[in-house]
């Protein structure tokens, strides 16, 4: 019959009939098909929403990936373990390759019907419910091994209904995509056994010093018993409790038919065999730095063993050199690297246990006179040579009057002497002559990334930076190219292109650094081989540095206090230089594959022989560098070591800085075509007063002293500068 519009279905008659007025009639098959399709569509949408929900709340896509969180063990360059992060894990096991009694122990106590169910065991759930009701508390769980694997690998430990539903769905998912042996293998490879040990292979080695394929029945039963409460039953802390639980597992194996009763009675008591302790620190100054360098690398299953650049012998030597230094409450930091940036030793403080703060990489301190490396490098790039002369006389910039250490001045001296004795006023004059922007450029080129302020105190090292930055900068000079990026991983390499030093710049820079250790403030660090370095001391001896290189090693040492209080009468040429020398004297003997840095050649002048600490008139021009009478100075006095100067007839005049005061005319400076200096007739850059302290001595208040013109340059015949690379004489 025809169905009129407006006819409604009668729910009491079922979906196949409709009411037509007072009459109940059968609805057409087409109408029934549309309703069925709508119901199916609704069910499909609900399933799709459920799958979508699980996609965001349960990591189905990761269910087939390795599940154990990786651990990382760092190795020294020689392959020795030095630190570990993460859990103690082992390689995965395969259930099919284990003796039958090993997986049987876990199945007996955790999931006897493992090979019969599909991921969820209704009989097991019912049995657990009855046992729990009888005891009045939760004494047995109904989760299958598949559900436990889902919980271990993908879910939190929250005891909520939502988590239980997710656990069941994930168990079904795992059963669909993985075979029974694969599920059991993953479970055994990831379950926790106490003592921060995960996985059967790691547990067998940790407790019994053997492979899982070699476990006896009683050992397998004990390990299976740990799964219920691994922290409480860990046999290293509760051996008797672990044994009792193991006996319970043996009884379960008998009950399940996995073990004969008489065989179970003959099993001996379990004893541990841990072997020698192999605990590694999970943190050291070097390890913390390298773990940060590793970053977010892709994790792998089990333990990763990563080789680093740290050399065990040198690290121990560094610690020993500092241990016997007598620091009297001060902090200390040391880093040593190869010229290409491979860090071989690092000490970030006196005690990592007391303070893991790394004073090599994290502390930012004023570098003091070690910063003069960049000032003189900028000058050499601009065409100056170590033989050029500069005024070591008082200077005023605006309202600021810096001073040398103990207000000692030497008159007109060479750049070599000014650098060796760490003249403050000479460094300031030089920076003003070449431009502070050129000094900052030199620092940036050598790898300094810390903020550098452009005030007039810049040459005295008043901008803060890390000890690692300074070590990397000196490594660039030793390496012959820049920048050098310090690294703790041998395969890290340079992340930027390197640039070789131009012309004779590196040779001249090494000449200056060698003068410091052979005749200047760093003589306390001199070794029997060519030694190059620079001292640094900040205001009131708050920081003391020695940074330098010899052989195939670049090493930086800092001494100071975390609260920035004065250390006492400690200067860069004193205790830091002594620590540096104590370490380097032994370290250079183990240099691997690197030749000692050569002694820099000096044109037209004679260098004293290596090891002849006090030059005499026979081996060094007295007019250029006269240090007679200084041989009896103690190491603590090296910072103010200086050539003897004539009797002063009065206070030296304060000389206003001029645009060309510290150097010969532009036309006489070689290689200006590559790095031109500002025009001499250009106005000097604006200078503002900087209230910060100077490097080696307190800043004196401004004094109203009449200015005088700079002294005339000496006659050309008195000294001839070394020729440039083309052999043309310089001035």
Image: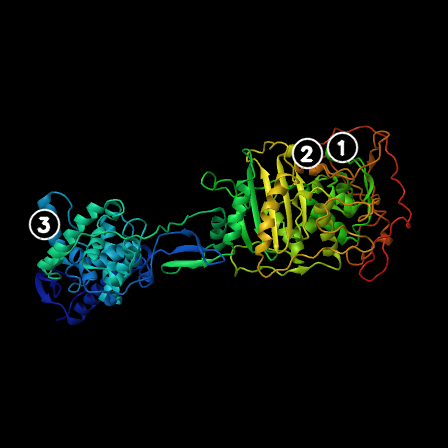
Q: Which residue is mark 2?
A: 693
Label 1: element kind: helix
| Whether label 1 touches label 2, CB < 8 Å | no
Regarding residue 728, the answer to whether it shows in the image is: yes
Label located before the other in sequence (3 or 1): 3
Is 33 above or below relative to 709? Answer: below
Give coordinates of residue 132: x percent, y percent: 12, 47
Which tag is nearer the camera, tag 2 or tag 3? 2
Crowdedness near tag 3: few (<14), some (14–19) or many (≥20) residues, C-alpha within 10 Å = few
Q: Which mark is residue 563?
A: none
504 or 511, nearer to the observer:
511
Which tag is nearer the camera, tag 3 or tag 1? 1
Q: CA distance from mark 1 to mark 2?
A: 15 Å
Which tag is nearer the camera, tag 1 or tag 2? 1
Q: Which residue is mark 1?
A: 407
Q: CA distance from mark 2 to mark 3?
A: 81 Å
Q: CA distance from mark 3 to mark 1?
A: 93 Å
Quarter of the figure with residue 264:
bottom left
Is 366 above or below relative to 471? Answer: above
Give coordinates of residue 588: x percent, y percent: 60, 53
**Which residue sits at x=18%, y=59%?**
217
The reply, left or right, for residue 319 in relation to residue 46 is: right
Give coordinates of residue 443: x percent, y percent: 67, 49
The reply, left or right, for residue 202 in relation to residue 119 is: right
Crowdedness near tag 1: few (<14), some (14–19) or many (≥20) residues, C-alpha within 10 Å = some
605 or 99, nearer to the observer:
605
Label 2: element kind: loop
Give coordinates of residue 190: x percent, y percent: 29, 57
Q: Which residue is mark 3?
A: 130
């Amino acid at each position: 019959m025809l169905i009129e519009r407006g006819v409604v279905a009668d729910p009491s008659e079922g979906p196949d009939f409709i009411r037509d007025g007072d009459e109940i009639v059968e609805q057409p098959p087409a109408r029934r098909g549309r309703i069925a399709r709508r119901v199916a569509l609704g069910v499909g949408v609900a399933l799709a929403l459920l799958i979508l929900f699980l996609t965001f709340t349960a990591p189905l896509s990761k269910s087939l990936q390795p599940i154990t969180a990786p651990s990382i063990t760092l190795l020294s360059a020689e392959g020795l373990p030095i630190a570990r992060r993460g859990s103690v894990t082992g390689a995965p096991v395969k259930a099919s390759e284990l003796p039958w009694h090993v997986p049987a122990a876990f199945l007996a106590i955790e999931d006897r019907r493992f090979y019969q169910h599909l991921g969820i065991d209704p009989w097991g759930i019912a049995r657990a419910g009855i046992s729990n009701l009888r005891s009045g508390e939760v004494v047995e769980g109904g989760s299958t091994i598949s559900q436990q694997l889902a919980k271990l690998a993908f879910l939190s430990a929250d005891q909520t209904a939502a988590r239980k539903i997710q656990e069941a769905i994930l168990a079904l998912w795992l059963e669909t995509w993985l075979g029974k042996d694969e599920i059991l293998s993953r479970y055994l490879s990831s379950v926790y056994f106490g003592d921060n040990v995960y996985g059967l292979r790691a547990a067998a080695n940790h407790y019994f010093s053997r492979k899982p394929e070699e476990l006896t029945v009683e050992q397998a039963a004990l390990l299976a018993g740990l799964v219920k409460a691994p922290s409480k039953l860990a046999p290293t802390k509760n051996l008797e409790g672990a044994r009792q639980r193991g006996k319970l597992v043996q009884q379960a194996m008998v009950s399940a038919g996995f073990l004969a009763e008489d065989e179970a009675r003959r099993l001996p008591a379990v004893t541990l065999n841990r072997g020698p302790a192999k605990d590694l620190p999970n943190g050291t100054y070097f390890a913390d730095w390298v773990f940060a360098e590793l970053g977010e690398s892709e994790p792998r299953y089990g333990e990763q063993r990563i080789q680093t650049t740290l050399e065990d012998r040198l690290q121990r030597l560094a610690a020993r050199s500092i241990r016997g230094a007598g620091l009297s409450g001060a902090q200390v930091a040391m880093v040593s690297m190869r010229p290409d940036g491979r860090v071989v030793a690092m000490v970030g403080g006196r005690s990592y246990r007391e303070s893991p703060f790394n004073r090599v990489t994290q502390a930012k301190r004023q570098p003091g006179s070690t910063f003069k490396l960049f000032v003189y490098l900028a000058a050499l790039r601009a065409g100056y040579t170590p033989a050029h002369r500069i005024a070591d006389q008082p200077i005023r910039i605006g309202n600021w009057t810096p001073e040398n250490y103990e207000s000692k001045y030497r008159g007109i001296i060479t750049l070599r002497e000014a650098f060796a004795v760490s003249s403050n006023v000479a460094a300031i004059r030089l920076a003003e002559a070449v431009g502070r922007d050129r000094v900052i450029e030199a620092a940036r080129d050598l790898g300094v990334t810390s903020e550098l302020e452009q005030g007039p105190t810049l040459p005295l090292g008043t901008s803060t930076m890390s000890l690692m930055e300074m070590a990397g900068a000196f490594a660039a000079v030793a390496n012959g190219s820049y920048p050098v990026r310090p690294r703790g991983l041998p395969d890290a390499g340079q992340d930027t292109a390197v640039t070789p030093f131009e012309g004779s710049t590196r040779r001249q820079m090494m000449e200056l650094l060698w003068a410091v250790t052979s005749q200047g403030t760093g003589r306390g660090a001199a070794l029997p081989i060519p030694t190059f370095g620079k001292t640094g001391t900040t205001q009131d001896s708050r920081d003391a540095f020695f940074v330098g290189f010899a052989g195939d090693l670049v090493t930086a040492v800092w001494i100071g206090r975390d609260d920035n209080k004065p250390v006492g009468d400690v200067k860069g040429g004193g205790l830091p230089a002594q620590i540096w020398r104590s370490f380097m004297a032994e370290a250079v003997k183990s240099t691997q594959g690197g030749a000692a840095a050569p002694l820099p050649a000096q044109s037209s002048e004679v260098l004293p022989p290596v090891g002849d600490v006090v030059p005499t008139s026979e081996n060094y021009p007295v007019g250029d560098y006269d240090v007679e009478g200084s041989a009896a100075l103690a190491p603590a006095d090296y910072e103010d070591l200086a050539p003897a100067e004539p009797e002063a007839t009065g206070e030296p005049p304060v000389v206003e800085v001029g645009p060309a005061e510290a150097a010969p005319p532009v036309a006489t400076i070689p290689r200006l075509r590559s790095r031109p200096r500002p025009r001499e007739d250009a106005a000097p850059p604006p200078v503002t007063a900087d209230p910060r302290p100077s490097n080696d001595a307190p800043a004196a208040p401004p004094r109203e002293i009449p200015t005088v013109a700079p002294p005339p340059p000496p006659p050309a015949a008195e000294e001839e500068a070394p020729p440039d690379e083309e052999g043309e004489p310089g001035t």
